[in-house]
Image (spheres, coloured by chain):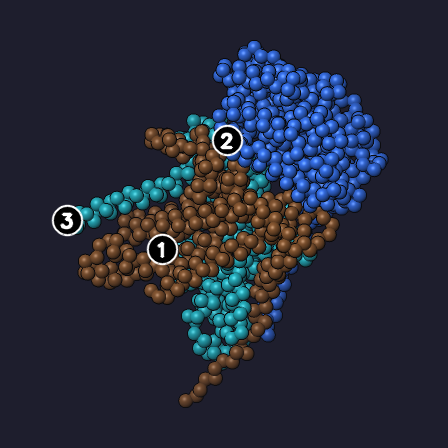
Chain colours: A brown, B cyan, C blue
Amino acid sequence: MVSIQRSSQKSYPLYFGLPAIAVFATLFLVPTITSFYYSLTNWNIHARTTEFIGLENFRRLFADKKLVAAIWHTLVYAGSVTVLRNTFGLIIAMMLNMKIRGRNVLRTVIFLPFVIAPIVIGYLFTALYHPGHGLINQLLRGCGLSFMAIDWLNDPRYALMSTILVDIWRTTGFAMVIFLAGLQLIPKELYESADLDGAGAWSRFRHVTFPLLASSLTVNMVISLIGTMKVFVMILVLTNGGPGYATQVFNTYIMSAFSIGRYGYATAANLLLFVMITVIGMPVLFVLRRREVEL
Amino acid sequence: MIGTRARATMWIVQIAAILIAAIVIIPFLMILLNSFKGIREAALFRLSLPTEWVFSNYVKVLSTSHIARGFANSLFICGSVVVLGNLFGAMAAFLIQRRGGRLKLLYTTFILGLILPVSIIPTIKLMMQLGIHNTYLGIILFYTATALPFTVFLLTGFLKSIPREMDEAALVEGSSFFRLFFQIIMPLISPALITVTIVVTVNTWNDFFAPFYLISDSRKWTIILQIFSFMSQYQTNWGLVFAFMVIVVSPVLIIYLVLQKHILAGLTAGSVKG
Amino acid sequence: MKNRLLILVMMSALVGTLFAAGGQEGEGQPVTLSVVLHNTTLRGPFEDIFALYKAKTGNTVEILTLAAGEDYGVMMQTRFATNDYPDVFEMDPGTKQYIKLRAEETLYDWTNDPIIDRITESTREFQTLNGKIFGIPWGSTGNLGVYYNKDVFDAIGASVPQSWDELIEVAQDAKAAGYIPFYEAGKTGWPLQIFPLDGWTTYVDPVIGDEGVQALEVNELRLNEIPAFRDVFVKFLELRDLGLDQDNLLAGDYEEQQELFGTGKVAMVLQGHWFLTILIDKFGEDFARNSVGWFPLPAEDGPGTATLYAASQFMVPKLADNVETSAELVRFMTGPEALEIWYTANPGIAVYKGVTADLYPAQQVVQDFVDMGKAKVNVQNRLSSSFIDFPQLLQQMFIDGDVDNALDTLDENYRVTGEARQLPGF
């Protein structure tokens, strides 16, 4: 028997990875590394020289009540959107999985807002949320629900909630699609044997459906969390962080520091965001992955 | 008995699903209808047909707002990013997946890019130092860099299902390495390439963040920045604004409707394999 | 081997087109110049002026507007820092902009240009720093103050209030008669600043004087250490608490403010000279002449001090591509035909000589205050640091009613900016 020589490692030339490494290193890694340096300086648009100031930027950041508020809003936003988007996404996916009529059309329609640019969705909702005669309040009043016709974007009590609802409207379709794909992979036999064991709907969900959706859940949760902590355009366009500072989030805070030229300070804030995402994202990813494996 | 209950449930679910779809459609309907109304009527945001069909909104938008330029810029940038990202990403993924060993570290580095946010301000500084700030090259390379993590991630996963034996067979038959990669491997990973293309295109086309920070020359603005600029000028003439939105959203909408099966399939294939 | 070469060629071609795409600005006639304006500047007259310019020279002018306010200055600085120069740009008033932009190195020097002879004496002085002029003033000296609808005042039998208490009374009469006494554009944000700034010249300047302002300039006095200024904030909140603002202050919109004022539903607004221009544009000359009046925020026991808003200026970066053509454009803009177009649409206290001032009654009142010596330039134009985020912190004040927090935030922002700009004393 002729032994086929195993292709040596050398057949896969190292330089093949060079373009990707070059681009990624230059435009992602280098700035990430230099941001550590810049966050420790007083770099700003007015100064002729950039000087090392140690942890001064961070001291100022933590002393700023507006940043604390921004962090809080970001966490509330990320948590709410993640939980709600995925809950609705799952429910709708299960609904569509029930072989109702026109489910492909419905799937296409519900996913639609996800492909439209967030900036357009944001402007759309500034029209929909108009307190006087925006479509939402029009419909609420028409149904006799006038007490719900609040000033969605200008009332500091409700502004953040309103932005959360917009995000959910836009992205539930995405969660739904991922869950739907996961659902369709669950073998019918499992449901049948559950039925034979006399399981009710909730039991079926808890013991068959939900566990087997583990990988879809991981994907959805992690993407949601990380993406929503970086929310920017939506809020910029809906409320610009206002009224007052009621909807200020991390990225809008960074932008406001940037637009007055405080670059070192803004970079330090960005570093904090990066830490926050890692500290929250990694454990979640880890726990969910572990669960996938165990199941 | 079970039959009736199941059927009733089906009906409820059916209606609920239609309602949900309606929640999605109605806002777009409002935009469309009001785009044909004059400034005063459009500001009422009613779901009614225009009392008077106004086409001048569309005329004004098309003639004054440099929309074509915005589209051209977006198309050029997206296209370039897709080409470069797919090419460089596939090359790197192939290398990493086949060669293994110490390249695992490289893989991890790319994965980091999936989680870490971009440090946009040092990026601006770096691009200025390299002389590529506010240039097409600069933003294309930037987007490519941010697209690579996902690309490498997805393609390495996909490549696992393509046996090494194929490579060996080809090489043994005297094929060059390049031939192996471009004529054999690339076609085989095309489903994953499609997924990557879809994701990268949607993200790049719709992105506000990068052009906002990296492009200050209005002639290079993508369609997204064009929207931003238009809105800050005309935000109170809703008829005009809605006409603008219709025009800007239409290409995306049409492509989506035509390709939706592929798009949705592509996305899910990626997630399940991942 | 051949394949490798092919790849290399394709990649270089791709990269090459990218580089080419980056640098393909065409040279040669005719040229397209980019002019950056504040978004509060009326575009119409400029479009007419530039159309005339194009007819004469064949060059096209593209107008780009950026949001007015503190950000505007920083945007321009950013563009300068990235060598992305516009051809001509409008800038906030004052010689402090020369310092911000390092005029000696970056801007076209107008000191000996024929345009200078056409500017009024006092304006020329205002534009000069160390004997040099780098910005060409534009339009008219503006103002900040209370614009009132004369028809509404007639309907309720009110006359121009001569004290703070009279102001409250007039507002309450208006409210009783079903009018909105004051409309504040809370959502739009920037108009909220006008009350405190107008209040400054009436309440704060008399107390702290020029020495006080100079102390602020070098960080020897803090904004939250001035009781008179705190008092202005308290009065601002008081109007809302007495129900004298429209119902939902935080939803207030600049467009709606114009609309309701012009249709006689609102009695008074705190606004600037640009407001009159927009009223002329939307509601006609007759309305502006007959129905729009002006007075400065009154003092406790007498009429207030008029707050003047220095004219903005046009500058030409000398490191841009088409410097001479841009300079020619500016000369055209300040020539008789162009000025005619501008002042017809925007009559006012012109900064150019020989412009026949057909002042509107509202503007005449401002002029009278100037003649009486009871006018002072907006404090923002007198300080090198800036009131950053002023609109947001005022919105926040209306939300939580906390005047001291608002002042502390303003003070903090002011000092942080001074430090960032490396101004002496910070």
Q: Residue beneath label 1, please?
A: A179
Subunit bearing disc 2: C
Subunit bearing disc 3: B
Q: Secondary structure at mark 2?
A: helix
**Label 2 CA crowd tier, 10 Å (few <14, some 14–19, many 20+):** many
Q: Looking at numbered disc 3 in the image, what kind of residue is underneath it?
A: Met
Residue C187 coordinates in the image, percent (x, y): 53, 33
Subunit bearing disc 1: A
- In this rendering, do the residues under marks 2 and 1 share a single chain? no
Q: Secondary structure at mark 1?
A: helix
Query: Would residue B217 be visible to someone looking at this image?
Result: no
Report how far apart the C-alphas of labels 3 and 1 lie in the structure.
31 Å
Report how far apart the C-alphas of labels 2 and 1 lie in the structure.
40 Å
Residue C232 coordinates in the image, percent (x, y): 62, 27
Q: Would residue B173 be found to the left or right of residue C136 on screen?
A: left
Point out the image quarter for the N terminus of chain C. Answer: bottom right
Who's the residue at 70% across and 54% down the image? Answer: A51
Closer to the camera in the image, C140 or A36: A36
**Label 1 CA crowd tier, 10 Å (few <14, some 14–19, many 20+):** many
**Rendered image: mark on residue B1:** 3
* Contact (Cβ within 8 Å) of mark 3 with mark 1: no
Who's the residue at 62% across and 22% down the image? Answer: C146
**Rendered image: mark on residue A233:** none
The nearer-to-camera label among 3 and 2 is: 2
Q: Looking at numbered disc 2 in the image, what kind of residue is underneath it?
A: Ala
